[in-house]
Structure formats: C-alpha cells, structure tokens
Amino acid sequence: MSEKTHKMQRRLTRRNVVAGAAALAGLAVLPRLAGAAKAPKSALKYQDTPHDGQDCAGCIQYEPGKSASAMGTCKVVEGPISPKGWCLAFVKKS
Ligand code: SF4
C-alpha cells in the first residue's frame, strides 16, 4: 500500500468515526425529546381564543385534529388544544 493510500484511508476512517459519533449523539437526544413533558396550559397562559390575530392553527407547535375546527394537540402544551386557542409559546408558521 502506498503512503498516499494509507493517509487517505486514515482520513476516511477518522471522518467515519466523527460522523458516527455525531449520529449517536443525535440518537441519544431523541428519547429525551420524545419523553419531554409538555407544559400545563396554565404555565403558558393558554386560552381558548385568539390573541392579537394569532391562534394555534397558525402556530408551528400545533398538530391539527380530524378537521380544521376539531380540537388538536400541541407539541409543548398538554391537553386538547383549540385551533382558535393561543398561549405564550406561540410561534408563527412560516
Ligand atoms: Fe397553541 Fe401555544 Fe401550542 Fe402554539 S404553542 S399551538 S399557541 S398552545
């Protein structure tokens, strides 16, 4: 094996180790995110009505129900969430 080939193999191996470590770190975070507790409605001042033209249907955290007017869920607030609701964690969909 030439010295050049040997160096390339070492570089590839190091890159694979770094990529593998990054992937493992990402996988380690997933269960924590998946298991993260949602906040109670009161903690984020959730209300069933819009606030200054903002509502849950327009928030990136909202997960719609079976229809546009049905109750949905939220990624960060616990319990059923109205599409016309709002809370302090509102983040506008882009
Ligand atoms: Fe509604 Fe707040 Fe959840 Fe956004 S973060 S969907 S505003 S409850």
Image (cartoon, rainbow, N blue to C red):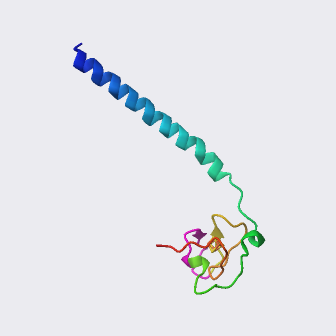
Taking depth in this image into account, of 32 and 83 the one nearest to the observer is 32
Residue stretch rendered in magenta on the structure: 58-69
**Residue 38 placed where, x, y %?**
71, 61
Taking depth in this image into account, of 24 and 65 the one nearest to the observer is 24
**What residue is shown at x 44% (from left), y 30% (from top)?**
17
Question: What is the number of callouts on the image?
Answer: 0
Q: Quadrant of residue 47?
A: bottom right
Residue 15 lies in the magenta-colored region: no
Q: Quadrant of residue 16?
A: top left
The residue most toward the top is: 1
Classify 23 as above or below 78: above
**Residue 87 placed where, x, y %?**
67, 75
Q: Quadrant of the N terminus?
A: top left
Classify 42 as above or below 47: above
**Residue 10 placed where, x, y %?**
34, 22
Q: Quadrant of ligand 1?
A: bottom right
**What residue is shown at x 64% (from left), y 68% (from top)?**
74
Left or right? Give the position of 77 relative to 7. right
Left or right? Give the position of 70 relative to 6. right
Residue 63 lies in the magenta-colored region: yes
**What residue is shown at x 62% (from left), y 79% (from top)?**
83
Q: Quadrant of residue 67?
A: bottom right
Classify 58 as above or below 30: below
For the stretch drawn in magenta, the main secondary structure is: loop
